[in-house]
Image (tube, helix red, strand yellow):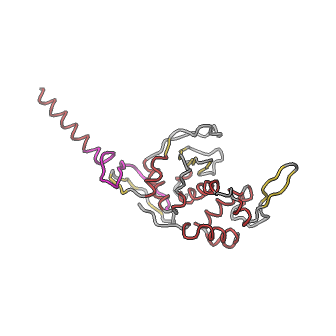
Amino acid sequence: MKNTILFISVFCFVSSGFAASKGRGTCPEGTYAITGHSRKAYMRADGTYVKSTNVKASCRRRSKSYDFWNHRFSDGRPDGWPHRGEKSVAWTEEEKERFYEAMASLPDLFQIESMRTIYRMKQSWYPPNPATHANGILVLYDAAFSTKGNLARYLAHELSHEIFRSLPDGGESYADGNGWRVEREGDKFVWSGRKSGYVDEDGANSRSEDFANNIEFYLFEPEKLRKTTPEAFKWIQKQYGAKLGMKGAEQ
């Protein structure tokens, strides 16, 4: 009886070790382990439609995207998050892999050190929002991972807000070159946008929103930006040049 128990114990140990090696166990240097999961259909950054499938447990090559972002995921909710009605959800394996792929298609300019944490929440207080950004915190909602949505585009927009926040001159050179002026309202001075020429009408709300919209369209709909806001197209091209261009996903 004791021999039988010993045999079963050894068998279970070997079996569990084998399972770990196929999932979260040791992977060769330069790779990381992913567990098997179901992946829903989605759209890649370049518009390619990817069918739903079952992804097998494997060791995947580490990319720049993985190395930069993997320690920034967090469950729960940001401290002091103002939208109390927004419910947090846990990150899934599928969503993280989708995130890595989307970021790998974007310029390295979006790997911003001041981006501290990425959270997952169910739905925005304003339901159409797929994502939102605030002071180094990024929140992605269910809508960001929808079948027809473009995750890379959503990320480019939100991370552009952080780029604007990090501009050394506080965004003044962008404002000066794109029709924004300081005007007096009573005893206050406020930024006032140009009268027209927005690729998205909410760009008139703030310099940061205008900047994020223009970077987004520069990457995903450059001709619309060139025709609608030529001064913004030229400013972005001069400011960032070859640093701001889409690239093939690394995984």
Residue 188 located left or right of residue 236 = right
State whether residue 231 is above or below residue 200.
below
Inspect the magenta stretch and tell me whether residue 33 lies in it.
yes
- Residue at screen point 59% across, 45% down: 123
Is 35 on the left-hand or right-hand side of 75?
left
Quarter-of-image position of residue 242: bottom right
Farthest top residue?
1
Q: How many marks?
A: 0
Q: In the drawing, does residue 13 fall left or right of residue 126?
A: left
Can see residue 7? yes
Report x, y in % for residue 86.
60, 40
Residue 172's place in the image compared with 142, above or below, is below
In the foreground, 231 or 166: 166
Task: Name the image quarter holding the C terminus.
Answer: bottom left
Q: Which residues are magenta?
A: 18-44
Q: Residue furthest right?
A: 186
Residue at the (63%, 71%) spot, across then down: 238
Outermost front residue: 168
Task: Answer yes or no: is residue 148 visible.
Answer: no
Residue drawn where x is 40% and y is 50% of the image = 38
Q: Give above or below for 107 relative to 134.
A: below
Magenta stretch encompasses residue 158: no
Residue 51 rendering spot, x and y as whole percentages: 44, 59
Q: Nearer the viewer, residue 80 or 165?
A: 165
Q: Position of residue 174 (x, y in %)?
A: 69, 63
Q: Is residue 50 above or below residue 56?
A: below
Question: Horizontal and vertical percent for residue 111?
Answer: 52, 56
What quarter of the picture does the N terminus occupy?
top left
